[in-house]
Amino acid sequence: MSQALTTLFATTKSQNRAALIGYLPAGFPNQRSAKKIIKAMIKGGVDAIEIGFPYSDPIMDGPVIQAAADQSLANGTGAKEVFELLAHSVQLGAPSLVMSYWSPIERYGVAKFAAAISSAGGSGVITPDLTIEESGTWLAESTKKDIARVYVVAPSSSQARLALVTAQCSGFIYAASLMGVTGTRDAVSGNASDLVAKIRTTSNLPVAVGLGVSNKEQAREVARYADGVIVGSAFIKIIQKSGAGRKGLRQIKELAKSLSEGVRDAK
């Protein structure tokens, strides 16, 4: 399953560009619309999809994603909908992952969760709050099911800590561009390029940068030094403002196209 990510980053490297990764919580604004939004993202040029597992107590999510997750939870979204949307995204031809805090995974059952990701054709799982020290069961089950383990590293990580964490990553490494929560920003933190450079001294895996990218210029800037550009809040804000009807879906596709041009223009 993780091979899809390996193939994607090999392809984008051969094209001398970064991969564009889009994020959307399952069940937002409802499950039926979420499927249409992901289709519009991919049609616009998004290369890979992150499906968010809505969680009531996020530590990394800013107000935009928190509001989307709250709406999703109010709709009754749970693991079933997460895996359903994951399978839908895979069927559309995009390497797809789930981004989840550890509590929902543990509650569902670690082995059962890994098996469900595999059954849906998922490429991996991003676990923003899981530490290496607490990863024993996940390391075993993800390896067994060939699921990429994507840990999140921050600008505050020491060189020793980076080496420890990146050694257990597979698929790619998620570099948080700043100390803080998700959300669109006027400028991408200068810490991002420094962090990517530090990561490259410890690992040969692709590095994708998230937190803050919202437009073509920012995508181009990040793509100059990163292997992947992750965008979430900017897509969600469109739906929160314009809805998931024709207008909103058109704007989703247009943003994806613009971001896609940005990652292609960078190098």
Image (spheres, rainbow, N blue to C red):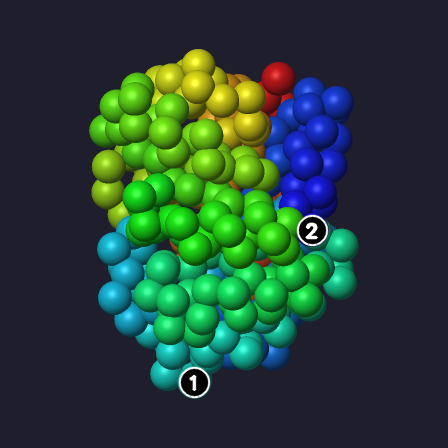
Q: Position of residue 107 (x, y in %)?
A: 38, 73
* Image quarter of residue 83: bottom right
Q: Give, as a three-letter code, the residue at label 1.
A: Gly
- The local secondary structure at tag 1 comes to loop
Q: Is residue 82 above or below residue 140?
A: below
Which of these two is toward me, 17 or 202?
202
**Residue 76 circle label:** 1
The residue singled out by tag 2 in the image is 1
Rendered residue at 64%/49% (across/down): 146
Residue 139 in the image, given as x and y percentages of width and height: 48, 48
Measure the C-alpha gap from mark 2 to mark 1: 28 Å
Residue under the image location 54 percent in, 78 percent down: 80
Indicate the position of residue 205 as horizontal and vertical percent values: 55, 27
* Pointer 2 or 1: first along the chain: 2
Label 1 neighbourhood size at 10 Å, few (<14), some (14-19), many (20+)? Answer: few
Please identify, in this view, whether the residue under mark 2 or under mark 1 is nearer the observer.
2
The amino acid beneath tag 2 is: Met
Q: Is residue 89 visible?
A: no
Please state which of residues 53 and 239 is positioned toward the viewer in this rendering.
Answer: 53
Q: Quadrant of residue 18?
A: top right
Element type at marker 2?
Answer: loop
Q: Residue at x 75, y 63 (%)?
A: 91
Vertical position of residue 198 compared to residue 162: above or below: above
Report which quarter residue 56 is drawn in: bottom left
- How many residues crowd mark 2 within 10 Å: few (<14), some (14–19), many (20+)? some
Is residue 6 shown left or right of residue 197?
A: right
* Residue 73 on image: x %, y %: 38, 78
Asked if residue 127 lies left or right of residue 223, the reply is left
Q: Nearer the viewer, residue 32 or 110?
A: 110
